[in-house]
Amino acid sequence: MKKLTLTSLTLLLVVVLFLSGCVPSKKSTSSENSDPNGPVEVTIFTPKFSDDEDFSENEFTKMVEEKFNMKINWEYVNQDAAKEKRQLSLASGDYPDAYMLVTWLDNISKVDAQKYGKEGVFLPLNDLIKDQAPNIQKAMEDLPYLEKGMTAPDGNIYGLPLVNECYHCSVSGKMWINTEWLNNLNLEMPKTAEEFKEVMKAFKNDDPNGNGKKDEIPLSGETPKVGGNPIQFLMGAFIPNNGIDYINVNEGKLSLGAMQPEWKEGLKYVHSLYEEGLIDNGAFTQNSEAFKQLGTPEGDAILGAAAGQHSAIFVDLQSEHSKSYHVVPPLKGPNGAQYTSSNYGNVNNFAFAITDKAKGEKAEALIKLADYLYSEEGTIATTRGKEGVHWKKGDPEDIDLNGQQAKLVQIPQDPNLTDEEKDAMKYGWGERGPLGLTRTIRDYTAADIDEWSPEGFERRLFNATKKYDGFQPEEQFNFEAAWVDPEEAEEVALLKININKYIEEHMVQFATGSENIDKDWDNYIDGFKTLQVDRYLEIYQKAYDLGK
């Protein structure tokens, strides 16, 4: 019944938006070029961030147009409506030659890739890659996860992802602690869950900021951000917890971590912290602004430890307090568990697809463009800018994140430039469409050697993340990377919403004592039956098996 309702609403939305004139105007994409030697004209759908953004006058655009003898007609959509307009264009049949997306605004899911690939709307790219795309082939060889992650269960590749191997982003569930307070109280960095609790007690009771007031907050966080909830980090001492789908893998078999006895023990531990006043009341309810006020007070520091992917979430980098916060490595639990969350080396979605409006020379021109963007030269040009203007080659004194001579150094922009001069310097399309922004490229960029300066923040995050290496579970599940059957996509999406909401509500209730974990645990487990958890795991198990 829910499935029918969602489908009906989707169709109604398409009709209403179409009649109200919200469909992007169709460009002339199917006509052949009148001049056989002239540039190949293609239409590319892409979001833009401001009304005056226009890639047609962009120097990078002109360079690639000349390089590949093509003329790009841009079909822009406002960033706020990017997903809606893309879906509408596909549903109406009024779609471009290619989609080039900004994945954090909108992306082509694996469900959509299968759906529109099967319908013939998205072209299979296998032969085009084989014949025209050496850089994409090289990326598939260099990155073991790439080809497997791009290839649909039917053996076809219907889209290309943005490869963005952000190392520090791979661990969202970090914990940061005020090491100045540790030093003031002659305490060591905690290594176990019990030691962490003892440190939090000392932060609460022993006046670590030395102002004679009981104003210290031992531990806080924010919601609903992944990584901001302290439970994500703390649960790693008991059971793997990525804070996203709560699904774990053991010998290829999926299970819901939030139903396991180890989860119960982890919640008991968190409740013990809360019961003793060691976790801030707002940790499970406050927003980012309130959280940052705790980490950036005008006077003495008041925050002892904070959950977050990076410290700038809770403390202003310009603040004197910023240098006090260092990461806590994964804690070892009473039964030896010691895990961190990780999301690295997956193809979750696609940033680029070629449609059946672009056949023959159009498809070849588009795959050559995508192939260039996957190359080191193309990736650097579109994301870092022009050599000699936006970046330069590193000198011996320029050090990259691995401690080697940097290959690339960003040239600081003159703060006195006028808006017109800044516009004239714009180059590239940013992190848009298919790119090969590998960890190698990210790491060989120069970073300030002083990791505690605002300019050295990337180095600080790099060094912090290294402390979590080796604690990731051997087997992991990423729901976005799974090839879910399109026929089951709506069903599992609804199940996921309901199950995650149930987990997260009870997680907080058990942590705060609103529910008694010993008395109410069995009822909590029984509730998953009503939510069809077996069916939920069945669908994802099938998708996980397809991706092996």
Image (cartoon, rainbow, N blue to C red):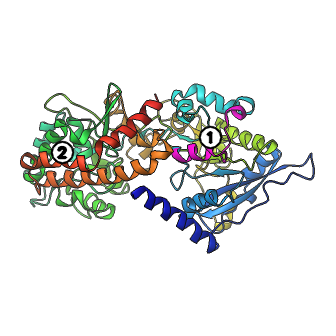
Residue 351: image location, x then y, percent: 59, 47
Sequence-first tag of 2 and 1: 1
The reply to whether the magenta stretch includes residue 48 is no
The disc placed on residue 158 is 1
Residue 169: image location, x then y, percent: 42, 43
Q: Is residue 17 above or below residue 531?
A: below
Q: Is residue 326 above or below residue 514?
A: above
The disc placed on residue 505 is none
Q: Amino acid at mark 2?
A: Ile
The magenta stretch is 111-129
Horizontal relation, residue 407 to residue 515: left or right: right
Q: Residues within 10 Å of mark 2 (few under 14, many from 20)?
A: few
Q: Residue furthest bottom?
A: 20
Q: Amino acid at mark 1?
A: Tyr
Could you say which is closer to the camera, residue 111 or residue 8?
Answer: 8
Magenta: main secondary structure: helix
Decide if residue 214 is in sight here: yes
Point 64% across, 49% down: residue: 390
